[in-house]
Amino acid sequence: MRQTLKWLIPTIIAPENPPGEEELLHLCDEIEAYLNCNKNFKLIYTLCLGIVNFLPLFTKGRTLRLLRLEARQDFLNRILRSRFSLVRGMSILVGLPIKMFYYNQEAEQVRLGFDARALKEEAGLRLVSRSRAQVS
């Protein structure tokens, strides 16, 4: 699964700066651990990934893995806009754990404008009370 994730993560995420080798391996490890804890999801995920990988064979003559990065991204974008909900759903499912772990990283959240630490600090400054107001 690690070899598949190494080419799939840059295809799904498509950042301006692709993840470095260390970050890529870290993401692969996290996703593999998640999939290993969820055997049924892993089975479905592997099946969908295999189908999505072989879909371009009919139109491009190559599997998704063998296409260039830009061609892989273009193909995935096309099937995300597909009329067929099953194909669209498989492509969404293939990207789900990758996006879940990639965008859960604090550095990515800050880059996108969500600073959890700042929100927690601000929340700590506010007094929250759950007492009910007396109605007379």
Image (cartoon, rainbow, N blue to C red):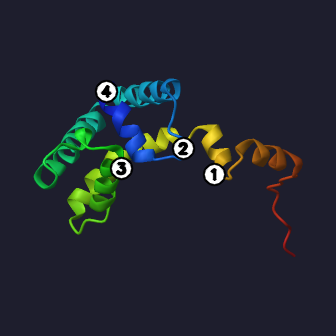
Q: Quick check: marks 2 and 4 in contact, CB under 8 Å?
A: no
Which residue in the structure is indicated by mark 4?
A: 3
Q: Residues within 10 Å of mark 4 (few under 14, many from 20)?
A: few
- Residue placed at 68% from the left, 45% from the top? 110
Q: What's under tag 3, amino acid-wise?
A: Glu
Q: What's under tag 2, amino acid-wise?
A: Tyr
* Element carrying mark 4: helix
Mark found first going from the N terminus, 4 or 3? 4
Mark found first going from the N terminus, 3 or 1? 3
Of the two numbered discs 4 and 3 in the rendering, the one whose residue sits closer to the viewer:
3
Q: Nearer the viewer, residue 62 or 124?
A: 62
Q: Quick check: marks 4 and 1 in contact, CB under 8 Å?
A: no
Which residue in the structure is indicated by mark 3?
A: 70
Which residue in the structure is indicated by mark 1?
A: 112
Q: Residues within 10 Å of mark 2 (few under 14, many from 20)?
A: some
From the image, which quarter does the N terminus lie in? top left
Rounded to the nearest whole Å, what is the CA distance between mark 2 and mark 4? 21 Å
Q: Quick check: marks 1 and 2 in contact, CB under 8 Å?
A: yes
Of the two numbered discs 2 and 4 in the rendering, the one whose residue sits closer to the viewer:
4
- Residue placed at 59% from the left, 37% from the top? 105
x and y, in percent, of residue 132 in the image:
81, 62
Q: What's under tag 4, amino acid-wise?
A: Gln
Rounded to the nearest whole Å, what is the CA distance between mark 4 and mark 1? 28 Å
Which residue in the structure is indicated by mark 2?
A: 103
Q: Nearer the viewer, residue 127 or 111?
A: 111
- Residue placed at 56% from the left, 41% from the top? 104
